[in-house]
Image: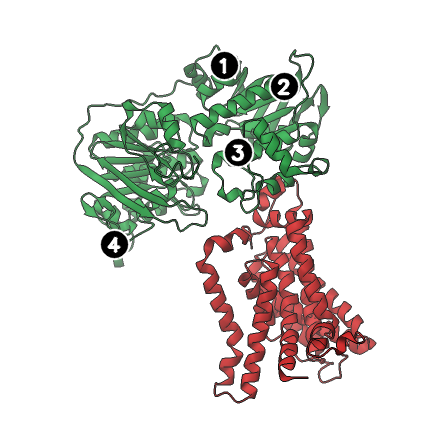
Chain colours: A red, B green
Amino acid sequence: MSPYEAILLTIITASTPLLLAAIGELVVERSGVLNLGIEGMMVMGAVCGFAAAHVTGSAWLGVIAATFAGIATSLLFGLLTQTLMTNQVATGLAITLLGLGLSGLIGSGFVGLPGVKLANVSIPWLSDLPYVGRLIFGQDPLVYVSIALTAAVAYTLNHTRMGLIIRAVGQNHASAHALGYRVVAVRYACIAFGGATSGLAGAYLSLVYTPQWIENMTAGRGWIALALVVFSTWLPGRLAAGAYLFGGVWILGLYAQGMGVGIPSQLLSSLPYVATILALVIISTNRRLSLINTPASLGQGFVPDR
Amino acid sequence: MLNKSNNNAPMTLLQVTNISKKFGDFYANDNLNLSIETGKVHALLGENGAGKSTLVKMMYGALQPTSGSIFWQGQETLIASPAHARELGIGMVFQHFSLFEALTVAENISLALPVQLRQGDLSQRIADLSLDYGLPLNPAALVADLSVGERQRIEIVRCLLQQPKLLIMDEPTAVLTPQEAQALFSTLRRLVEEGCAVLYISHRLEEVKQICHDATILRHGKLVAEVDPKVETAATLAQLMVGSSVHQVSRNTNGEIGEVLLSLSHLYQSSSAPFGVDLVDVNLQVKSGEILAIAGVAGNGQGELFSVISGEERNPQQHFISLLGQVSDGLNINQRRLLGAAFVPEERMGHGAVEHLSLTDNILLSRHACNDTESPLDRGWFGIDRRQLAQLNKAISINYDVRKSREDDVAGSLSGGNLQKFVVGRELNRKPKVLVINQPTWGVDAGAAALIRQAVIDLSRQGSAILIISQDLDEIFELADTIAVISRGQLSPSYAASELSREKIGLMMAGSHEQTAQAAGA
């Protein structure tokens, strides 16, 4: 395997959890909900996925457990913000803190134990093609899941009635309610979807990226995913491009460090965050374009006036 | 499109009997009776807060009555939800459109249609139907890019696609130019000929006389009269609505016109808001003793113009604006107030006043940096002069008839009309040399409007220069000495009020004075 191939492979592995977490959050935000608890949902997914895979010995059962852990955490967020009308920003932060703490507790017995790695896809002949075989046909299954989910979300939002309703609810919840759509139910469903993909992103970390449980192993990826959604101006295609760009910057930083480039390692590892800030600045200068896609009722709770 | 009924004799379509709606201890509707017949335009008249919207919401299923019943085509019916109302054949065009700005026309309409009507080529049907009724619409256009008149067409077309038997329109012409209003009337006439019934809510009495066959008048939640609008005059209708004859604003025309106190020359300003309007080459002059009114349909740059004049948007490098002879582009709002200018923005709540603060605190907010009180309100280390603030509050309440339950209530507890009197009174109380008001009487009942207008005229006759931005032509003709019209950020030259007719203003509202009018396809 050539070094370039190796770099590309690691970039894809680094980008996939970002894409998984961000594509769910994109749907959540399109429906008008700001869930800052991605980090918490991811880390819950990571610990539950690892635990289930370790106990059962099946990586796939781990993936399923992680998904449900993400959904459960997100539904707690939903219950608080949609039914009990708490502030979304504060609740999201609380979910992140809760997730980090609770996952540490659950995972305390699993630290240092051997994990189960989700096997890569192997298609006879195709996966052995030179240069592109491993890259295109030999990834782990969740890479394909993340790409399929992105395509499905893009199609759903733009070409189906369900997507139209989600966008309408996020644009103007009062009007959507007046037309008879169930704003809160739509938002619950979107929040649960966001929880599921965040859980998957967590599973990716503890079952593929580094198949073991380390406390706080999400290491801020949830926040990058959140920034990516804004970076993409809520468009799935741009989101995928952004996820691979950030993954790329991250990995190239690591390689530069490894090759002894004379830059302090702290500076390199801060590159993704710097890129995020730059992207936010650039986007906010082009107001009209980004505001057409920005969900107008983002972060506002909805109480029907009856 | 609609089924023509073979027998053209009007029959009762919807009947409301003894209906009441109670909010807490307050009766918004008190024992109302009303019947709407096919083939007729039925007017529902009343002042703000008379209970028109409440009644209509019950007919559309958005509210449930406390008591009483609704009969639909002779059958007692419980209209459970707006969706149910639409199924029955009731369509409604709201005053504040329930549209999604970032979605296209077709998407907006599709969201509001039941499943069976969404099938097939919806865009084509929208284009056909809108042309057929003289309401042309591009189904692929983004709502954010459309004018208010076009947005209203979306709502109407979306109702028409459902072939309604009853169409409810809530103040549909409030946002239209006179010509657009006439086009709407011919659409309504055609609908009525086809056997549809229309319930028409308005407080513009002339147009009610023009198109309505019956009129029901509400006051304080009670039904006060059922009249034939064709035989009434606007004055008798107004009297029924208000309950007493409305104070006529008197305009003493021999005021002294003096020097120019406010002038804008060749002002350009690009909007900072996402869907805002850019101001292009705006010129105006207001002299001492003069009232200049700017007419125009909402959303044509009025808000942008106001914020440039008030100092909410500043251009320190420019020399567009002169207040009392001084270049003011770089001055902030307090510096402009110190020069002797006062500003009343359009939204009274949240912009003109802070909801949760007391009235005295609200006075302090706009007056603390002015030097026209007896002594400074802000005494630095000695704190705020509460005693003087309380006096000011009392004076404003008395002079401008602000009604409230406690002397120093929070702004949020005042009704819209009373809050407007307070916000205007707070500025008028200063006797400013230059006064700029955006929508002085928007959503204010006739009594309060007359009081505000009279106060504005009195101030101008004492030598102040006054600029009014308004959508209400009646108000403009009542107040203005000179009139200019704004459309798409371009301001027409000013004309003496006596030189202009409503039709001429209507043409200018539609952009006849714009330099770019032809290029923009207007």
Q: Earlier in the sequence, mark 2 or mark 4?
A: 2
Name the residue beneath numbered marker 3. B152
Report the chain holding disc 1: B
Which label lies toward us, 1 or 2? 2
Secondary structure category for the residue under label 4: loop
Which label lies toward us, 2 or 4? 2
In the rendered image, residue A129, in percent from the top left (x then y), is placed at 74, 77
In the rendered image, residue B35, in percent from the top left (x then y), is placed at 62, 18
Q: Count the numbered circles shown.
A: 4
Name the residue beneath numbered marker 4. B379
Q: Amino acid at mark 2?
A: Glu
Q: Earlier in the sequence, mark 3 or mark 4?
A: 3
Say whether mark 4 and mark 3 are on the same chain.
Answer: yes
Name the residue beneath numbered marker 2. B194
Name the residue beneath numbered marker 1. B229
Residue contact between numbered discs 2 and 4, judged by CB atoms under 8 Å: no
Near mark 3 (Cα within 10 A), the count class, few <14, some 14-19 or many ≥20, is: many
